[in-house]
Amino acid sequence: MAAILMAEDPQRALEHARAAKDRAGRVGVVRETAGVAAYHAVEWKEALAELRAARRISGGPGMLAVMADCERGLGRPEKAIELARSEEAKQLDNESKTELAIVAAGARRDMGQIDEALVELETQDLNPDREDFEAARLFYAYADALVEAGRKDDAKVWFTRCAKIDVDQMLDARERIEELSK
C-alpha cells in the first residue's frame, strides 16, 4: 500500500510503511520501503535511519544515492560527499553511480563548490548520443551546474540534449532553454 500511495500522498504512504515496520521490522524490504516513504515525505532523519537499517539487514550498497540526498536534506553535504567516496559506492551499478554523482554534485553546490560539482558530473558518461532517461537526468544536472558556473551557452546545449531525450517532459529542460534564451 505504501508504494502505491508514495507519489500521490507521501505522508499517508509513510503511515502505512510505519505500520508495516511495526509488524515486520526485521525484513529488509519493509525497512527500505519505510525509508523511501520517509524520503518522499521529506522526513530526512527517519529516511536515513530506515535505509541504514535496511542495508544492515539485507547487505549491499543499495539506496546509497537516497541516503546521500538525505544527508543533504539534513544540512550535511559533506556527509553526502563522504558516502559518494565510500567503498560501497564502488560496488554500485552504472545507473546508481550516475544517480549518486548527481547527488554528490548537488552537495558540492550546497557548499559553493561549483567547479567540483561539474567534475562530479563529468566523471559520468556524458556521451551526447545517449538516449536513456538516466542520461536525460545527468544532462539536466550538468546543464543546471553549468548555469550556476556562469556558462549559459554550454548549459543551453546540455538542456537541449536533455529535452531531446525527455519526450514526456518529466524535466523542465524546455522551459530552462527558453529562460536562458531571453
Image (cartoon, rainbow, N blue to C red):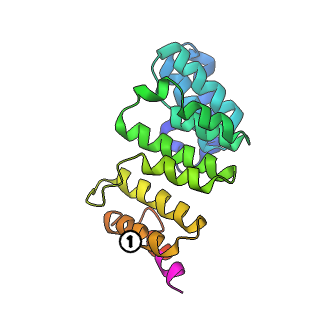
Q: Quadrant of the C terminus?
A: bottom right
Q: Nearer the viewer, residue 114 or 79?
A: 114
**172 w.r.t. 61: above or below:** below
Residue 42 pos. (x, y %): 67, 44
Residue 31 pos. (x, y %): 56, 23
Q: State the image quarter where residue 114 is shown.
A: bottom right
Q: Nearer the viewer, residue 88 or 20?
A: 88
Which three-letter amino acid code belongs to the residue tagged 1? Thr
Residue 38 in sight here = no
Q: Which residue is mark 1?
A: 160
**90 w.r.t. 166: above or below:** above
Q: Residue at coordinates 63% horizontally, 33% vertically from top-left?
A: 47
Q: Nearer the viewer, residue 121 or 173?
A: 121
Q: Give the main secondary structure, helix, strand or loop, of the magenta stretch.
A: helix
Q: Which residues are magenta?
A: 177-182
Question: Is residue 45 left or right of 85 when viewed as pictured?
Answer: right
Q: Residue at coordinates 25% horizontally, 60% vertically from top-left?
A: 129
**67 w.r.t. 154: above or below:** above
Mark 1 crowd level (few <14, some 14–19, many ≥20, 10 Å Cα): many
